[in-house]
Amino acid sequence: MHQRNRIITLSVSGGVLVTVLGLFLSGMLAIKAGETSAMSSKRYSDQEIDDTNRFWDDEGNVGEAKPVGPQGVEAPSSPNFRPPETVQAQLVDEPYDEPEKAIRGKIIFVTPEGPAECSGTVVDHPSGNMVWTAAHCLHGGRGADYYKRISFIPGYDGKAETSAEAMPFGRWPVREVSVPDQWISDADPERDSVASPFDFGAFIVEPPSGKGSLQEELGTSAPIMFNAPRNLTVESYGYPGEEPYDGSRLYTCKSPTTDFQNDGWPDPAMLWMGCTMTAGSSGGGWFAEIEGRLYLVSNISLGITLRTAKTMTGPYLGNAAHELYDGF
């Protein structure tokens, strides 16, 4: 049985009804999200990489992948946290093999419930092989483990006529993956979560035979700005897979951000934007122009539908995220 996203209607103070989608998480965090924290990592063996390649060589397994997230929680009731307005996701024009588009891609992996999919972004890193995404696309949280058979498909186009066109740069298996320890110890898929500010992660891919690094093959990558300014206008990108989307195409939303934080959650507050993308877009990058340059400043984490707006949140990439990046 494949992993499915929960859809629940909750009542919050003020009589606002909130529909939440995704896996629910819980736990208590001992430190603030913007401060340094311990990271956990896993390195996949050559045998595991061979198994990953064989598994996804079967196109039927790719077709079976079900969208994961965005995670869902209640909207904050404090008047200090005002929801952004709905922004309708727009289809990104093809082709996706152009460098500035190909840095966005689909992540496929296997959970205990079956094949699954998320989104990710190729980021600038000394290894030349780093992809940034959400922690819930890599690890199941408290009592669980890292997912298996993780692969990245840059510039994925599910509407292409052939596999070569759908994966213009091929499929890249993951060699090493890392998420915050707070995610591993505190994220509970059965409840809403203060672990959400730690919903970020990254991995290093293993170049397929005959290829250079991921950055070399694509010709570009996205720089990350840690501890970026707030109150930005951002563009999010992902492969939404729940209705009315099918996970085959890249979509984007452009929205100003506000802050998101529930009672008991660690500082700093997450970022909040309007967007109609659904599960499968999880992990996709948020981009903002700062001093004339485009930076990745967050990733898709929580999906929240209020009576008045459809929104998503992303973690603030502070010192903890910088530590994870430097740990590879």
Image (spheres, rainbow, N blue to C red):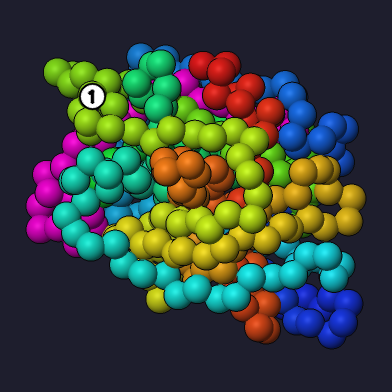
- Where 297 sits versus 15, above or below? above
Q: Residue at x 87, y 82 (%)?
A: 14
Q: Is residue 22 left or right of residue 189?
A: left
Q: Is residue 196 left or right of residue 322?
A: right
Q: Quadrant of residue 144?
A: top right
Residue 267 is a magenta residue: no
Residue 106 visible within the image: yes
Residue tagged 1: 216
Q: Quadrant of residue 50?
A: top left
- Where 311 sits versus 69, above or below? below
Residue 167 is a magenta residue: yes
Nearer to me, 231 or 217? 231
| Residue type at numbered disc 1 | Glu
Magenta-highlighted residues: 157-184
Which x, y percent locates residue 262?
A: 82, 57
Q: Residue at x 56, y 18 (%)?
A: 326
Mark 1: few, some, or many residues within 10 Å (few <14, many ≥20)?
Answer: few
- Helix or strand or loop: what does disc 1 sit on? helix
Which x, y percent locates residue 57?
A: 22, 38
Residue 67 visible within the image: no
Q: Residue at x 43, y 33 (%)?
A: 223
Nearer to me, 279 or 131? 131
Which x, y percent locates residue 274?
A: 56, 68
